[in-house]
Image (cartoon, helix red, strand yellow):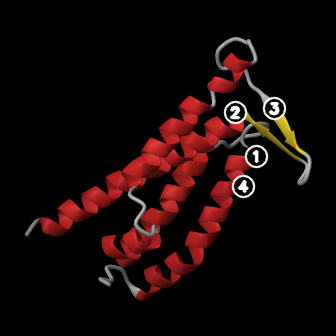
């Protein structure tokens, strides 16, 4: 594992990455009714992986992602965004009309806006992480 940061950066990255990821999930889940949502939550999560990338390098960050390619995250995000528009068609309502379902066991309200926000989250996370990883790999190859 190539370490590209200092001791302070390495220590900070180990403590801040889980906090940033938890905060991004918080922003994602509260985003429909209050400020937040998939885009800003995806940026916060990408910031967590970027901090880890600067501290430990590209290969260590790929190990943390457990072989999930950022391009796959973009594809899953776009797929979820497309899936979120389908339930309104089955209910005979206009395109992009929000649908809500209550999950009684955990008393949770699932919705098509939440599915869309999760798709945006994955698309933004994959895009930003992929761009930064590519830039780091290109920078490493230059003399």
Q: Is residue 113 left or right of residue 18?
A: right
Q: CA distance from mark 2 to mark 1?
A: 11 Å
Residue contact between numbered discs 2 and 4, judged by CB atoms under 8 Å: no
Q: Which mark is residue 113?
A: 2
The residue carrying mark 4 is: 26
> What secondary structure is found at the residue carrying circle 1?
helix
Q: Residues within 10 Å of mark 3 (few under 14, many from 20)?
A: few
Residue contact between numbered discs 1 and 3, judged by CB atoms under 8 Å: no
Reading the chain from its start, which is encountered first: label 2 or label 4? 4
Front position among marks 4 and 3 = 3
| Quarter of the image where the C terminus is located | bottom left
| Quarter of the image where the N terminus is located | bottom left
Residue contact between numbered discs 4 and 1, judged by CB atoms under 8 Å: yes
Q: CA distance from mark 2 to mark 3?
A: 9 Å
The residue carrying mark 3 is: 100
> What secondary structure is found at the residue carrying circle 3?
strand
């Amino acid at each position: 594992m190539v370490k590209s940061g200092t001791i302070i950066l390495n220590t900070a990255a180990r403590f801040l990455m889980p906090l940033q990821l938890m905060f991004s999930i918080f922003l994602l889940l509260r985003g429909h009714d209050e400020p937040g949502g998939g885009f800003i939550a995806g940026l916060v999560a990408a910031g967590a992986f970027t901090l880890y990338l600067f501290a430990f390098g590209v290969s260590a960050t790929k190990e943390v992602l457990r072989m999930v390619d950022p391009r796959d995250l973009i594809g899953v995000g776009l797929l979820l965004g497309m899936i979120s528009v389908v339930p309104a068609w089955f209910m005979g309502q206009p395109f992009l009309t929000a649908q809500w379902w209550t999950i009684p066991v955990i008393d949770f309200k699932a919705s098509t806006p939440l599915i869309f926000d999760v798709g945006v989250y994955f698309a933004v996370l994959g895009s930003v992480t992929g761009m930064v990883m590519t830039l780091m790999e290109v920078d490493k190859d230059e003399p």
